[in-house]
Amino acid sequence: MNYIIPLTEITPRDQPRVGGKGYALARLAQHGFQTPLTYCLTVNAYNDYVGTTGLRERIFMELNRKDFKEMRWEEIWDASLRIRNLFLTTPLPSPLQTELADFFRASLADKNLVVRSSAPEEDSARASFAGLHESFVNVRGEEDFVHHVILVWASLWSDAALLYRQELGLDIEKSAMAVVVQELVVGQCSGVAFSRNPNDETQAVIEAVYGLNQGLVDGVVEPDRWLITRGTRRLVHNPPPVRPSCFRPEGDAVALVEMPPELAAAPPLSQEQVWQIYDMALKAESAFGAPQDVEWTFDQGTCYTLQSRPITTVAADGQDQRPWYLSLRRSFENLKRLRRRLEEELLPAMTVQAEELQKQDLSSLADADLAAEIERRHEIKAHWVAVYWRDFIPFAHGMRLFGQLYNDALRPADPYEFMALLSGAPLASLDRNRRLAEMADHLRQDRDQAEKIRQGEINALSPAVQQLLNDFLSTYGDLSCPVTGGQCQQGPQAVLHLVQELAAHPPRLVAVAPASIPALTEAFLSRFAGAKRTEAAEILDLARASYRLRDDDNIYLGRIEAQELKARQEAHRRLAERGLEVPGDLPTEELSRALLDGTYQPRVPEKKTTASNQTQIRARQLIGQPAGPGLAQGPARVIASFSDLTHFKHGEVLVCDAVDPNMTFVVPLAAAVVERRGGMLIHGAIIAREYGLPCVTGVPEATSLIRSGDALTVDGYLGIVVIE
Amino acid sequence: MPSDTPTSPATLPPEISTLLDSQHLAVLATHRQGQPHVSLVAFAASADGREIIFATTRSSRKYANLQVDPRAALLVDSRGHQEADFHRGQALSARGPVRELSDPDKASRLNLFLTKHPHLTDFVHSPSCALMCLAVHRYDYVSRFQRVIEYRITP
């Protein structure tokens, strides 16, 4: 048998085909450790699967769409999701299917299983992939077994694993995955043991939780922790403040359940058991000749070793990027907490902050106070930008979590079908567009009024349109300013210009009629029953919040940015009165100094000049990501500066660096959207989908090789842009 | 596309020079009264990419076709006849008129050609063999399966 090896038959020669985890388990068993019933599915199975189905080349074609180093984190997410869907929708070739089925019936039928990743690159001292690939606990039945083997294979291409492999310079074309299949030991308590504390090598650390290990591994259940001084065997116990819950097998998955009160009061391990685990960790260290990170579980008094891997040496310079890559994946529990933080703390605090700044009368400040205020506002903005990156960006993972659940349950041909269930949310930029459309409707019905406005007679506005315009300006600003909510005092011309252009053409409707969403939602939820249905509904709700915030967070942040800008504009006004004209992007310190010192000549940052030889080559066809399906043609309108937006004409293709929520008001005029910045779930892609426009994102040369006026064909199915 | 956007030889990207250097054979397309005809030819490209040199006997069909209409296209690619060609392969097509070389232009091109294909010495020195030069007006470079960039070269 080529594909499956029982643990007891693994020899050193097999290491490259059973992977790091599988080989370590075989060595544990040979050294007399108690291990669960275990088999290894070799990399031959993976290679035959991806080789005979053509999947291997499809993966490389996906990853080769652009230089990996140029891919943003989100684009890697997207590529990874698409690859995962390829795995989900590609059945096993029949000889492999037959062999796995025969093996399952002969050796695993009626057992609850753990299906673990075991990549050959994994668990070497240089490259610890701990936690980067997936493992599944409590898998039952033949179909589910095969499904989870495929999911483990797919996790070779997870976003975090791809990034980490790139960081280490490993050749992805040689990557393969073995799988460890174990009988699930339903322990009463479980945990990990580090034979040496990665932070203090005089110590060993043991962590334990009731039930299964899952909560400990992803940080949802806080463990009891014991620190042991290795030489003196001095033991210190740090219990968690409370032990409210633990993970148990439930149905065909694991679930977080409430702890029985009699258990919650006591630590999961007796002192004697702590020593037993400590001795096991030391024995593992001596068997492998290096400090080990051992996963274990206690069942009916027997301690099982589930896996052992070397502790990655903590780099002296603290350059281990793995924690960051791991943070890319967020559990449902983690995201729920994050959502509460965003909705209940951060967004209200941002609103309060913006309002506090708005109330201040800048014109009454002395020059010195204004200078101090500009710096204060600059710091406030920097603070919120940092919060944005730390807390808001990761929350986008709510959409991913739902997308994965949806794809697992429905296995759709289009890996982004799930987006339809998220659309129709009351996005701030759609509200803004709705108000513009309403004004355009008025002008469409009253040609006479429209004509007068075209000739510049603003007074010809009917009271109804005047009212809509005033409301619009007070809520969203006048569109002349690159920052949402910023009152740039430019007047209503830009808005009126846009409304006229909208009125000259039939209205564009938002694509997915909200009426279809309940049916789609039910089609999704009907795949689940009982508690799982409740959880599926909660994940969908979380994803909708994530989708909405993806848009709105920019607007909240924009309001704070506008207040910094307002203070800077006051400074510019005062400097202009003294006869000093300075550019708008002058650094804050220079601006303050000029304000304080009447004789100071600020250093003006040099403008970057674009290389002229870029015009000497011509793109015929550029590749990005297919971010919104459809095919459209039209002349390009390349947005180099904000003022280009005001020239935007109906039927043009919006080509830009990144669609910012503050430019989405032209999207209803556009034939298609092309962005340099990549991602399926970025703002431009979301808005394009709302309007049913073809959209291609992640085109590296979008703004350098496409020029305004070029005739474009945007293929949103294949993610390519053709320049005629 | 305005046709007045020339590229200087220096702007030909290194991946194109590398491709031209690494490949020995190219597919040459000519036609006779509209009937396309393709042939495999050994080629050598000048360092600036402006000239592609190949050899043919004067009795060949491609030679006859080029006498009537010198316009030709030539495909150079990095196929390895493996599945991985789809993500790794590059293809470069060159367009331009072909002329037969004679002295004094011929010597340096002959040297270029034989440096790359020393085993063809007897062939190119045969009195029946012509050394040909395609003056490249334009390259279309395809990589990453469907990324297509054009490079125009002014004569």
Image (tube, coloured by chain):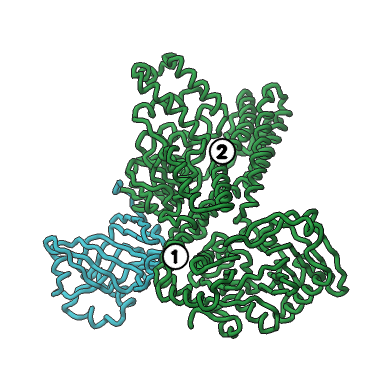
Quick one: which chain is green? A
Label 1, on which residue? A60
> A106 or B73: nearer the eye?
A106
What x and y, as percent, mark residue A167?
58, 64
Label 2, on which residue? A552
Amino acid beneath label 2: Asp
In the rendered image of this protein, which colour is used for chain B? cyan
Disc 1 is placed on an element classified as helix
Left or right: A710 as drawn, with respect to A283: left
Q: Residue at x 86, y 68 (%)?
A: A235
What x and y, as percent, mark residue B82?
37, 73
Left or right: A476 as drawn, with respect to A457: right
In the displayed structure, A308 sits above or below B149; it is: below
Left or right: A47 as drawn, with respect to A340: left
Image marks 2 and 1: residues in contact by CB distance under 8 Å: no
Disc 2 is placed on an element classified as helix
Q: Is residue B105 visible?
A: yes
Q: Residue at x 61, y 67 (%)?
A: A129
Q: Which mark is residue A481?
A: none
Q: Chain of mark 1?
A: A
What x and y, as percent, mark residue A154?
50, 65
Q: For the C terminus of chain B, give its image quadrant.
A: bottom left
In the displayed structure, A434 sits above or below A175; it is: above
> B130 or A182: nearer the eye?
A182
Q: CA distance from mark 2 to mark 1?
A: 35 Å
